[in-house]
Amino acid sequence: MLKKCGITLLIVALAAGCSSKTDENVKKEQNVVQKKVEQVKVEPKVDLVKVEKDKRQKYSSNMLFIFKNTANTDSNIAELLELARVRPMLFGSQDWKTDLNKQHEQIGYDYDAIKKYPQEQIPDAFKNCHDILLKSYDTKLRGGEKILQAVNETNSGKMAEGINLRIESRDLFDKYTKDIMSVPDPK
């Protein structure tokens, strides 16, 4: 019996000793976690104005690149249409139609590039302007489709519709430009 009591006391003493060591380990772990949390708080602050300015600069550069492509394509389309106006027999030329179609496809590529521009990379202040730009390109594309139909069908009514849509597209682009220029610099 004495032996049983001694063993029981030994087990209780060991258990009590182990639990105090466990408490010390928990306290050490809490101190380590607290130190880690304090280290995270020391990180330098991000200059949000600089980030916004960089985002605007990148967006503007990317859009300008697309606009230059579109301007060249528009110039090529105008040349092709002027050639056909001077020489109406070109309206029947498959090569001329193919050239016109390729130019129209290029406008579509530019439109896709604008549509697929990552939303998170569009500055918040430019989002409404970007929507106007998308509408401008959509209208330009629809105008081009009407012009292509007019050429294939020799339909002057569709040609007028296409030209009017292209004019509407230009007006939307002018609104985009005006609106984006009126956005104040971040402060």
Image (spheres, grey):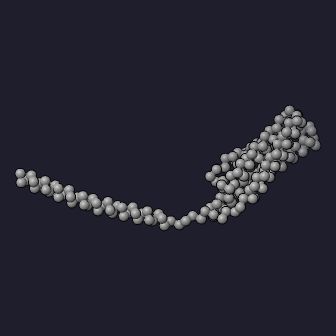
Residue 125 in the figure: left or right of residue 103: left
Residue at left offset 64%, top offset 60%: 52
| Residue 53, image x, y percentages | 66, 62
Can residue 129 be seen here? The reply is yes
Q: Nearer the viewer, residue 51 or 72?
A: 51
Q: Is residue 147 above or below residue 28?
A: above
Residue 142 in the figure: left or right of residue 83: left
Name the residue at the left extreme. Answer: 1
| Residue 29, image x, y percentages | 35, 61
**Residue 93: quarter of image:** top right
Residue at left offset 80%, top offset 38%: 145
Residue 147 in the figure: left or right of residue 125: right
Q: Is residue 23 above or below residue 149?
A: below
Q: Nearer the viewer, residue 92 or 108?
A: 108
**Residue 77: quarter of image:** top right
Q: Nearer the viewer, residue 99 or 137?
A: 137
Can residue 92 be seen here? The reply is no
Residue at left offset 18%, top offset 57%: 14
| Residue 84, image x, y percentages | 90, 41
Name the residue at the top extreme. Answer: 153
Q: Is residue 99 above or below residue 11?
A: above
Residue at left offset 70%, top offset 51%: 128
| Residue 22, image x, y percentages | 27, 59
Q: Is residue 65 above or below residue 161?
A: below
- Rendered-image quadrant of the C terminus: bottom right
